Amino acid sequence: MKLVETWVKAPFLRDALLLVVGECVQEVFPKVFKEFTKECVVLTSCPEVENAKLIMGKLATIITCSKPREITVLTIDGSPGCFQLHASANEALFITKANVPLRHFVIVEGKASEVSAESVRVGRYLHLVQKCIQKNPEVLKDLRRYSLERHSKEAGKS
């Protein structure tokens, strides 16, 4: 069910375990998707097509009206659009001041990996990301493994 098309007071949302998942996850990583959907109300979204502010507002309204028991966000790591789902969930909790557990997972190499809400917050502040790189430059080796942009630049140098 699409997040932005779901009625915020739908009975199935009350006290639910919500899974907010990137629209393409089910098709690209069906095993991971199935693993996460057990006992959850699944709401899909794609910030590349849907406005991130609308997504955040919808989540905030669901939190306020339906009081979910927990929210989990599952996306594909490295996708700028997917990152916005994580940021929107953080912002919705900030705005509502609700005490709802929120967990963030990203899919890396076909496996889900949990990341902290703080990681999502740091990702919004590029000067802090720069500090992290300066203190931990070996992270750039990992970046080379995942970033196609980096591979393209390196290929152009040879």
Image: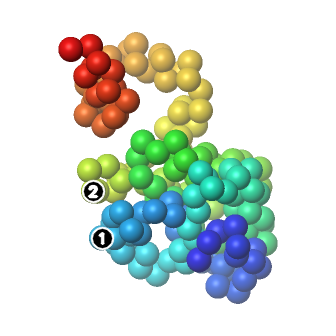
Q: Name the one closer to the observer, 38 or 96.
A: 38
Residue ID at (47%, 16%): 131
Kind of element beneath mark 2? loop
> In the rendered view, does 80 fall on the left or right side of 32?
right
Number of marks in the rendered image? 2
What amino acid type should be assigned to the residue bearing mark 1? Lys
In the image: residue 109, left or right of residue 7: left
Q: Earlier in the sequence, mark 2 or mark 1?
A: 1
Q: Residue at x 41, y 69 (%)?
A: 26
Q: Quadrant of the C terminus?
A: top left
Residue 20 visible in this rendered orientation of the protein: yes
Which residue does the numbered mark 2 point to in the structure image? 110
Is label 2 in contact with label 1 (beta carbons under 8 Å)? yes
Measure the alpha-carbon separation of dots 2 and 1.
Answer: 9 Å
Q: Which quadrant is home to the N terminus?
A: bottom right
What residue is rendered at 56% in x and 18% in y? 127
Q: Position of residue 100 (x, y in %)?
A: 63, 61
Percent across and percent down for residue 99 are 67, 59
From the viewer's perspective, is 101 left or right of 133? right
Q: Amino acid at mark 2?
A: Gly
- Residue 72: x percent and y percent? 51, 62
Find numbered disc 1 in the image and state the secondary structure of the residue it sits on.
helix
Of the numbered discs in the image, which one, if any, rests on residue 31? 1
In which quarter of the view is residue 150 placed?
top left
Foreground residue among 75 and 122: 75
**Residue 15 - label:** none
Is residue 138 shown above or below 1?
A: above
From this view, report whether residue 80 is shown above or below residue 157. below
Query: Can you name the residue that lies furthest to the bottom here?
Result: 11
